């Protein structure tokens, strides 16, 4: 474990923190023992956002984003100016998690598409990269990213589960591809082919914890320490050492999220 990893997408505030001594500090300490040295805690709703900022202030190795997840229904949508104002904070390194989800949401989803457009516009105003959620919505997601000129700030396709063609389209728009524990699932054969082919300079790894725990923890609560199992599986697929994956993905993280302060 000579090369430290970055968990490029986790939800520390959603973990069952009572299961760790010292709460978040215990989570981070466990991860460090597994060779994970930096964490991006991703925003999914604005009510919890102040707590993320406090976490970033208390833990140098934690970076945060600002955004509203596409599955979060709101009585009042955030205005563009509100997103810009909140995103200006120096502790915010990215805008999102934003995107489209046609799996969990039903009916007329124009509100999701408009929310995505506002997040992209905020990211461009702030010159900060985007964190994109895409589930069964690739055509519309890519179309909106192109129409809004998202390539000017780039970002990451988080928890990527799509095909190679979609990965190529994303990379052409200046986006990285991030693999979660799903890549370790036996059924994820197409995704594993993407992981084998993807240029290392466009790859990130993540847990999306507390969700999507990798094998051998599938079905259990996920945690940032387990990003090492994602990296190890990709290394096995590519017939290389896990340190090669760790070095490349950690470098990529700090290249993309320039507001994040390297802590190792």
Image: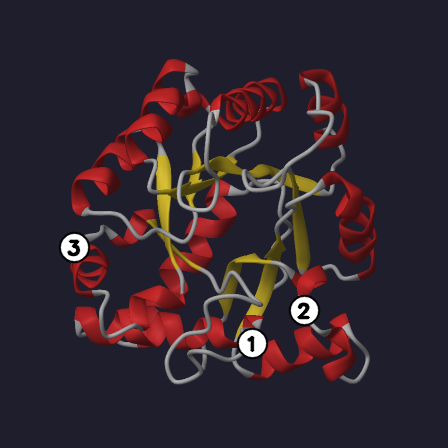
On-image quarter of the C terminus: bottom right
Q: CA distance from mark 3 to mark 1?
A: 29 Å
Q: Which residue is mark 2?
A: 15
Q: Which residue is mark 3?
A: 197
Labelled pair 3, 2 in contact (Cβ < 8 Å):
no
Circle 1 — which element? Answer: loop
Residue 152 in the figure: left or right of residue 15: left
**Image x and y of residue 229, in percent:** 40, 77
- Of label 3 and label 2, which has the lower sequence position? 2
Residue at coordinates 40% horizontally, 75% vertically from top-left? 214
Labelled pair 1, 2 in contact (Cβ < 8 Å):
yes
Q: Which residue is mark 1?
A: 221
> Does residue 253 lie above or below 123 as drawn?
below
Residue at coordinates 22% horizontally, 52% vertically from top-left? 198
User: Label 1: few (<14), some or many (≥20) within 10 Å?
Assistant: some
Labelled pair 3, 1 in contact (Cβ < 8 Å):
no
Residue at coordinates 83% horizontally, 53% vertically from top-left? 54
């Amino acid at each position: 474990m000579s090369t430290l990893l970055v968990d490029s997408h986790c939800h520390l505030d959603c973990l069952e923190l009572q299961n760790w001594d010292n709460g978040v500090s215990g989570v981070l300490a466990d991860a460090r023992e597994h060779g994970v040295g930096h964490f991006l805690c991703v925003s999914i709703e604005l009510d919890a956002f102040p707590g993320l900022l406090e976490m970033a202030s208390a833990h140098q190795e934690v970076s945060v984003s600002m955004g509203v997840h596409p599955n979060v229904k709101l009585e009042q949508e955030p205005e563009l100016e509100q997103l810009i104002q909140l995103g200006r904070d120096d502790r915010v390194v990215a805008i999102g998690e934003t995107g489209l989800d046609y799996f969990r949401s039903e009916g007329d989803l124009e509100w999701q598409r408009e929310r995505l457009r506002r997040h992209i516009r905020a990211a461009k105003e702030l010159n900060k990269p985007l964190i994109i959620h895409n589930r069964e919505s690739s055509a519309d997601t890519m179309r909106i990213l192109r129409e809004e000129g998202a390539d000017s700030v780039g970002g990451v396709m988080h928890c990527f589960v799509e095909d190679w063609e979609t990965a190529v389209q994303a990379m052409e728009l200046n986006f990285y591809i991030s693999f979660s524990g799903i890549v370790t699932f036996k059924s994820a054969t197409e995704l594993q082919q993407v992981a084998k082919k993807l240029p290392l300079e466009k790859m990130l790894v993540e847990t999306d914890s507390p969700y999507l725990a990798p094998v051998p923890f599938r079905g259990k609560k996920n945690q940032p320490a387990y990003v090492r199992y994602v990296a190890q599986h990709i290394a096995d697929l590519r017939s290389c050492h896990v340190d090669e994956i760790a070095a490349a993905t950690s470098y990529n993280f700090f290249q993309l999220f320039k507001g994040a302060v390297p802590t190792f």
